[in-house]
Amino acid sequence: MTQIHPSAAVHKDAQLADDVAVGPNCVIDSGVSIGSGTILEANVVICRNVRIGRENRFFPGCVIGSKPQVMRLKEDSEIGGLVIGDRNKMHEHVTIHPGMHPETSTKIGNDNFFMVNVHIGHDCTVEDDTVLSNLVQIGGHGKIETGAWFSGLAASHQFVTIGKWCFVAGLAGLTRDVPPFLTVSGHYPPKIRNVNKRGLDRAGLDESQQEQIFKAYRKLYRQEGTLLENANALAAQDGLDENVRAMIDSITKSSTHKFCRYLETFR
C-alpha cells in the first residue's frame, strides 16, 4: 500500500505504485508516474509529467523536473520531459531539469549516485553507474556516459560529453569533450592527466584490455603531433579493440566542432 504522509500534496492524476513512500511536505504534480519501491523523503518536489522508475530514493529537498533555467522561457511555455530509470540515489537538494522543448527530454539511467546539491541541466543524458559528488553542476545538453565519476565542485559546460569510466577531479571546469577511460582536471583548458585505472577496474576490464587502453593513451597523449593526428594514426592500425576504438571515435567526433564539443554540432 502506498504510504503518503498527511502533509504531502499529491495531484489526483499522479500514478504511484502500491509501495511508493511519500514523506512530509512533498509535492507531486500532475502527470507524474513513480515506480515500485521508490522513496521520497521530506520536502521533495516532483514536477509535472516526470516519469520515475523503480527503487529510487530522493533525500530531503530535491526538486525534480522544475522548468529549465532559460531566460526566454515564459510562464506558459511548453517544456519537454524528464525520465529517470531505476535504483538511483538523489541526495539532499539535487535538482534536475526537463527538456527545453516539448519534443525533448532529459534522461537519467540506472544505478546513479548524485550527492548533495548536484544540478543536471535541461536536455542532458546521464547513463548508468555514474557518481556525481557534492555540488557538481552539469550544463544543458550534456552527456555523461556510463561509469563516469565526478569529484566535488566540478562543472561541465553545456554540450560537453564525458566519456565512459572517466574520472573528473575536484574543481575541474570542463569546456570540451573527454574521451573514455581517462582522468581530467583543471580548467580553461582542462587537461587529460592519465588513464583512470580505478575506472577500468570498476568496468570489469581484464589485464589485456587495460593494457591496450594504456598503450593507446601513450600514443595519443605522450607522442609528438596533435591529438587528432595521433588519433588518425592509431585508427589506421589493425587489431584495435573496441575500447581503444571508443577513445579514437570520441576524439574524432569532438574535433568536428571548433570548441571540441561534438554535441554542439547538432545545436
Image (spheres, rainbow, N blue to C red):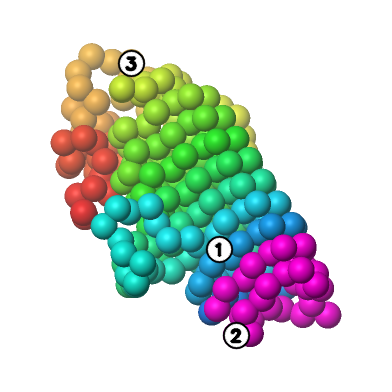
State which quarter of the image contains the N terminus.
bottom right
Report x, y in % for residue 57: 71, 57
Judged by depth in the image, the label closer to the viewer, 2 or 3, is 2
The residue tagged 1 is 84
Q: Which amino acid type corresponds to the residue marked 1 in the rendered image? A: Ile
Residue 222's disc number: 3
In percent of the image, x 25 and y 31: which residue is there?
A: 231
Question: SS of the residue at dot 2?
Answer: loop
**From this viewpoint, is residue 165 visible?**
no
Write down the region rendered in magenta. Answer: 1-30
For this rendering, which residue is in front, 62 or 81?
A: 62
Question: Label 1, label 3: how many angstroms apart (C-alpha)?
Answer: 40 Å
Q: Which amino acid type corresponds to the residue marked 3 in the rendered image? A: Arg
Q: Is residue 124 above or below residue 174?
A: below
**From this viewpoint, is residue 51 visible?**
yes
Q: Main secondary structure of the magenta part?
A: loop
Report x, y in % for residue 195: 48, 25
In percent of the image, x 48 and y 24: which residue is there?
A: 171
Q: Which amino acid type corresponds to the residue marked 2 in the rendered image? A: Asp
> Which image quadrant for residue 32?
bottom right
